[in-house]
Image (cartoon, helix red, strand yellow):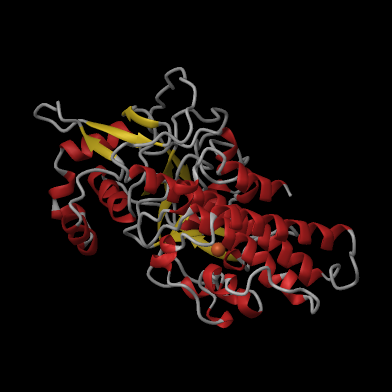
Amino acid sequence: MLVRRGTEALCKPLSPEDCGAQSMPDASPVKWHLAHTSWFFETFVLGQRPTYRPFHETYGYLFNSYYDALGARLARPERGLLTRPSLADVLSYRSHVTERMFALLTETPDAWVRRSAVIDLIELGLQHEQQHQELIVTDLKHLFGSNPTRPVYRVWPNEAPSQETALEFVTFDAGVREVGHSGAQFAFDNEQPRHRVFVEPYALANRLVTNGEFLEFIRDGGYSRPDLWLSDGFRTAAERHWRAPLYWYERPDRGVEPCFEIYTLSGMTPIRAEDPVCHVSYYEADAYARWFGARLPTEMEWEAAAEELPIEGNLLESGRLHPRATAPHHVRLRQMFGDVWEWTASAYGPYPGYVPFEGAMGEYNGKFMCNQMVLRGGSCATPREHIRASYRNFFPPDARWQFSGVRLARST
Ligand SMILES: [Fe+2]
């Protein structure tokens, strides 16, 4: 119930028009997210009961995301065409599914409901909905950020200037480490099984790369130096006219050197040099690291360093949907959780002995293990209960609309 209400609370500041629009094929309308997360419970839990009748006969086609085992579906780029069902209809659908799920769990908890496989599906449905909470924020930011009026989603209070932390590298010894999820708590199939890896000696930056540091890269001609870039990245940056991270806008009053303002969900703001740089692609993160004389960490290096750290930071519950410099100061490695997803140098693939979830759920993660890079640590839009050290996010290397940033690493 809390998770379902949390999704709806994210939509409170929005108009029906806000909820229906789609800004690009990779992003979905808020209304579609609201319906799809309900479809998930309806299809994989409620629909397994012989007495259940679907809320609407077309919703299975409209709100299936990518499950080929379930048949045909609306193409993703066409989700913004759904002026019908209306937002009110979709909210009715949500209420129906929530009530039926609640009844299933509280009024008739028969033997079928108590099966561990069903409980696991319900847990997966809640974790899935939390993933879509983050996507609602990132997709909405892309929609609003594409709007010339730069709408304000939520005003967050003025904050005291945050303190800049000197960049240092924290060293780690070589050795055999265990990575991957263990224990009884929920984890996705792609985090398992736990297994051993060998890491050479390495060092991680004690904090994220900042806006001020990335601005130095820009002013040094970073975007036009082919020696810094992967071939795919240099071509992509040129074709798309990238000159700065997404949502950075050059100020018209600029002098010789480029100056920028940035769009946040709180509106346009001056760049704060000490805040983490955000909305960069893997290509830009990689080029920046090379310019600096460092590299991106592997996901194994990241996880081995993060495993003992408390899960705290600037996450969704902070209400500030933007990364910031302040972070717990009692740890050697700051901002490992929250603020921005950290690009790693690791391609997204299966762990040794990987077994996908059973049935249609096997399509949840496994079929995307190609042409994507792993990101770690969660962002300012990630629910606190959703992130952990073993969590593997993944996006194509040209993706920039997620809250994605950079932590540097070095071999020592
Ligand atoms: Fe989904």
Q: Position of residue 364 (x, y in %)?
A: 56, 70
Position of residue 38 relative to residue 351, above or below, is above
Position of residue 169 relative to residue 164, above or below, is below
Where ligand 1 lies, by image quadrant? Answer: bottom right
Answer left or right for 59 relative to 18.
right
Q: Nearer the viewer, residue 123 or 293?
A: 123
| Residue 164 seen by the camera | yes
Answer left or right for 192 relative to 409.
right
Q: Position of residue 73 (x, y in %)?
A: 50, 76
Residue at the image position 52 percent from the left and 37 percent from the top = 13
Q: Nearer the viewer, residue 167 or 113?
A: 113
| Residue 355 seen by the camera | no
Position of residue 67 relative to residue 250, above or below, is below
Q: In the rendered image, which quarter is residue 149 located in?
A: top left
Residue at the image position 40 percent from the left and 67 percent from the top = 78
Q: Position of residue 194 (x, y in %)?
A: 63, 65
Residue at the image position 46 percent from the left and 36 percent from the top = 153
Outermost residue on the top side: it is 160
Outermost residue on the left side: it is 256
Q: Nearer the viewer, residue 82 or 45?
A: 82
Count of labels shown?
Answer: 0
Q: Position of residue 225 (x, y in %)?
A: 13, 50
Position of residue 220 relative to residue 191, above or below, is above
Answer left or right for 258 relative to 81.
left
Q: Nearer the viewer, residue 403 or 275?
A: 403
